[in-house]
């Protein structure tokens, strides 16, 4: 068990801090120490992030004082992010870092704060558990048919304990009774801590997860491995949510959270027909909603909506590939930030062969035209983390030290792709030789 202290006072049971002691968002960190390493705990939305108190520039303490809510002027670096980015600013040399992911906000820089995994349980902040220890036994409390081929499962901890906190946009990594590990968007209310809600569309020709979940009865047991969030709600001047089919599930909590604020928002929900569309009643309660049944209404008209969005707006989209492609194209034309989650990668692992070079050792791994970089790394005898293996969970992310990745994932933003500092081994490839750090 790690030894933890806050302000010199030791906390028992591996507790880093009481949640109420972490300052409000925008007010700076609560610093604490774990095994002699100082970290800063920050509120981000409804969650907590932790960064080691070391600037990668010259190892100066960086977790000091309040964070900056807008960009600060600098004659040294040309920043690549907009003014809505919330940052940590090193008080010693002025380096600024994205509070959410630790990235150095300077063009061409791959520097990044070192993170520390944390989780919130029962009003306290703990070091994130790993491996088998992290699994939480769940049971199906209720099973409800929502639409054709769509069931909702309400999941509780088997021992009745509160479940880990989550923020809108998150998905749960679940281990099913068969041992399959699958990801499903959390679509309930994040303020409710005693249960998780997921909705699953049955895909008979899929990889087996939806078939198994549809067969589960009330009382069936499964495990929560972890909760991830690759699509959090960002600060924006306006929001447009575009959902296709079961893609409504990750977007509903985001739209409901946005609706509790004062930022203008709209929600477009497209599906084949009413019988196939889950959560129609919840969508109708959202301001600016539009429900489109393609058999009756045709495709949703998105071009004018996206073109009319103001500067600083954000689009959130989840749905089938055709809808995603349309929204990507229109968002790029309008210069609007897009946050997307797809059902499956746009392309498979195939392509031109390339070489993956491991930083440090210099080992060269040949990646064949019809295999993924992840498979090649494992074939060479190395351990590499993964989960969905479809390019959207982020589990297999590695740092890129040299070369040009061919990004095929749904995790990295356009700015992150342009920076070239990371890639997902499961689907992304290299435009020639790529050097990575496992």
Image (cartoon, helix red, strand yellow):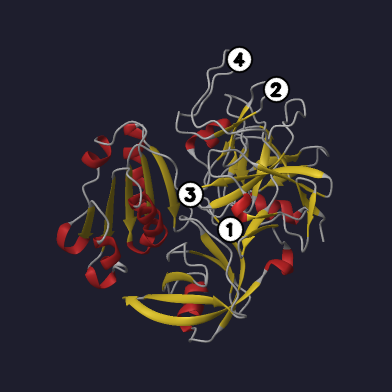
Q: Secondary structure at mark 1?
A: loop
Q: Is residue 375 left or right of residue 333?
A: right
Q: Quadrant of residue 110?
A: top right
- Whole-angstrom CA distance, mark 4 to mark 1, is 40 Å
Q: Between disc 1 and disc 3, whose residue precedes?
A: 3
Dot 3, crowdedness within 10 Å: few (<14), some or many (≥20)?
A: some
**The disc label shown at residue 92, or none:** 2
- Residue 76's disc is 4
Residue 18: horizontal and vertical position, in percent? 65, 56
Q: Which residue is mark 3?
A: 232
Crowd band around label 4 with a 10 angstrom C-alpha radius: few (<14), some (14–19), many (20+): few
Image-based side of 144 in relation to 15, left or right: left
Near-viewer residue (2 or 30): 30
Can you give x and y, in whole percent of width and height, for residue 153 in the image?
45, 76
**What element does badge 4 sit on?**
loop
Task: Choose the circle earlier in sequence order: 1 or 2.
Answer: 2
Residue marked by disc 1 = 389
Q: Nearer the viewer, residue 118 or 107?
A: 118
Query: Is tag 3's residue or tag 2's residue first in the polypeptide sequence?
Result: 2
Q: Earlier in the sequence, mark 4 or mark 2?
A: 4
Q: Earlier in the sequence, mark 4 or mark 1?
A: 4
The image quadrant where one finds the N terminus is bottom right
Q: CA distance from mark 3 to mark 2?
A: 30 Å
Mark toward the viewer: 3 or 2:
2
């Amino acid at each position: 068990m790690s030894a933890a202290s806050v302000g010199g006072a030791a906390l028992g049971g591996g507790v880093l801090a009481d949640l109420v002691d972490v300052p409000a968002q925008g007010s700076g960190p609560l610093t604490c120490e774990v095994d002699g390493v100082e970290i800063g705990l920050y509120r981000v939305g409804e969650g907590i992030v932790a960064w080691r108190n070391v600037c990668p520039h010259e190892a100066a303490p960086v977790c000091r004082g309040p964070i900056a809510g807008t960009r600060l002027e600098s004659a040294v670096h040309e920043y690549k992010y907009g003014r809505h980015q919330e940052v940590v600013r090193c008080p010693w040399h002025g380096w600024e870092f994205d509070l959410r992911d630790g990235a150095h906000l300077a063009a061409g820089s791959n520097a990044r704060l070192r993170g520390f995994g944390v989780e919130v349980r029962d009003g306290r902040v703990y070091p994130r558990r790993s491996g088998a220890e992290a699994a939480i036994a769940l049971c199906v409390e209720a099973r409800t048919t929502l639409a054709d081929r769509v069931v909702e499962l309400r999941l509780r901890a088997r021992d009745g304990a509160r479940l880990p906190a989550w923020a809108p946009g998150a998905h749960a990594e679940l281990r099913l009774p068969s041992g399959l590990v699958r990801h499903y968007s959390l679509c309930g209310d994040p303020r409710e801590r005693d249960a998780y809600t997921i909705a699953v569309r049955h895909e008979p020709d899929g990889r087996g997860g939806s078939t198994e979940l549809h067969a589960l009865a009330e009382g069936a047991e499964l495990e929560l491995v972890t909760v991830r969030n690759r699509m959090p709600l960002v600060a924006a001047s306006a929001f447009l949510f575009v959902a296709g089919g079961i893609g409504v599930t990750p977007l509903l909590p985001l739209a409901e959270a946005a609706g509790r604020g004062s930022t203008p928002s709209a929600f477009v929900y497209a599906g084949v027909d009413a019988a196939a569309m889950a959560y129609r009643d919840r969508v109708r309660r959202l301001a600016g909603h539009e429900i489109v049944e393609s058999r009756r209404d045709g495709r949703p008209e998105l071009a004018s909506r996206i073109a009319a969005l103001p500067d600083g707006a954000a689009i959130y989209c989840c749905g089938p590939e055709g809808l995603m492609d349309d929204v990507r194209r229109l968002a790029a034309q309008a210069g609007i930030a897009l946050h997307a989650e797809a059902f499956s990668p746009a392309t498979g692992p195939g392509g031109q062969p390339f070489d993956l070079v491991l930083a440090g050792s210099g080992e060269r791994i040949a990646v064949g035209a019809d295999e993924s970089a992840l498979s090649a790394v494992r074939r060479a005898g190395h351990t590499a983390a993964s989960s969905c293996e479809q390019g959207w969970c982020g589990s297999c992310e590695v740092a890129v030290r040299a070369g040009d990745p061919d990004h095929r994932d749904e995790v990295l933003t356009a700015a992150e792709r342009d920076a070239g500092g990371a890639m997902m081994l499961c689907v992304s490839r290299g435009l020639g030789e790529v050097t990575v750090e496992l």
